[in-house]
Amino acid sequence: MAAILAKKLGMTQLFLEDGRVERVTVLEAGPCPVTGIRTLDRDGYEAVQLAFGAVKEKHLSKPELGHLKKADAPPLKHVVEFRDEAGELTVGDTVTVEAFEVGQVVKVAGKAKGKGFQGTIKRHNFSAGPKSHGSHNVRAPGSIGASATPSRVFKGIRGPGQMGGGRVTQKGLTIVELIPGQNLMLVRGSVPGPKGGTVEVRTDG
């Protein structure tokens, strides 16, 4: 098992030796200093705490800076715990892309792009109504319940509302290439979030 924090740089394509083209997402993964170890005896669970994302000292509080200083880590913006990933790591160690291997299957979690308040066609893939001959139901959702019975709208009816912006985990992504010298990890497919967003990478299974 392995875990690391990374920044999404964007997508590109990679030509393999056999001529195939892979659509990959480029992640700048680590290096992530270990800033804490949670143990079953002391904390009630096992986890490793990693930090990532260089930032100026003025953007962190004194407690945050003190916590990082105990691990001899520079000012870093993101601190995340990974359950059951501690292994043989200790405070002060550094996790890099070398903890992963080409061909490994990973899952990537991050905050999805927010789409704002959207209607049912975009949010739930509803079909549009007729667009001619005086139609007044072009993008309306249609009937959402009967009037007499039950005289109300059932909970869970798909309707307009906030779309995106939540935590999303994309599973089953394969590592196509690792470039340790540049801390780069190339994974097949797309991962959640915008360019420049921070994501969590774990081995899947």
Image (spheres, grey):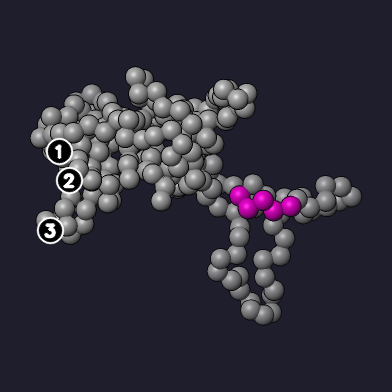
Q: Secondary structure at mark 3?
A: helix
Taking depth in this image into account, of 21 and 70 the one nearest to the observer is 21
Taking depth in this image into account, of 72 and 15 the one nearest to the observer is 15
Residue placed under numbered mark 3 in the picture: 41
Q: Quadrant of residue 75?
A: top left
Disc sitting over residue 171 in the figure:
none
Q: In the picture shown, does residue 34 fall above or below 162?
A: above
Give the magenta part as a residue range: 123-127
Q: Position of residue 37 (x, y in %)?
A: 17, 45
Q: Position of residue 11 (x, y in %)?
A: 53, 28
Q: Main secondary structure of the magenta part?
A: loop
Disc sitting over residue 91 in the figure:
1
Residue 193, visible in the rendered structure: no
Q: Residue at x 12, y 58 (%)?
A: 41
In the shown orientation, is residue 54 left or right of residue 152? left
Residue type at tag 3: Asp
Taking depth in this image into account, of 138 and 105 the one nearest to the observer is 105
Residue placed under numbered mark 2 in the picture: 37
Extreme-front residue of the structure: 18
Q: In the picture shown, does residue 34 fall above or below 169?
A: above
Check if residue 126 falls in the magenta segment.
yes
Q: CA distance from mark 3 to mark 2?
A: 12 Å
Q: Are marks 2 and 1 in contact (CB under 8 Å)?
A: yes
Q: Are marks 1 and 3 in contact (CB under 8 Å)?
A: no
The N terminus sits in image quarter: top left
Residue type at tag 1: Val
In the shown orientation, is residue 177 left or right of residue 33? right
First in residue order: circle 1 vs circle 3:
3
Check if residue 87 falls in the magenta segment.
no
First in residue order: circle 2 vs circle 1:
2
Q: Position of residue 82 (x, y in %)?
A: 29, 47
Residue type at tag 2: Ile
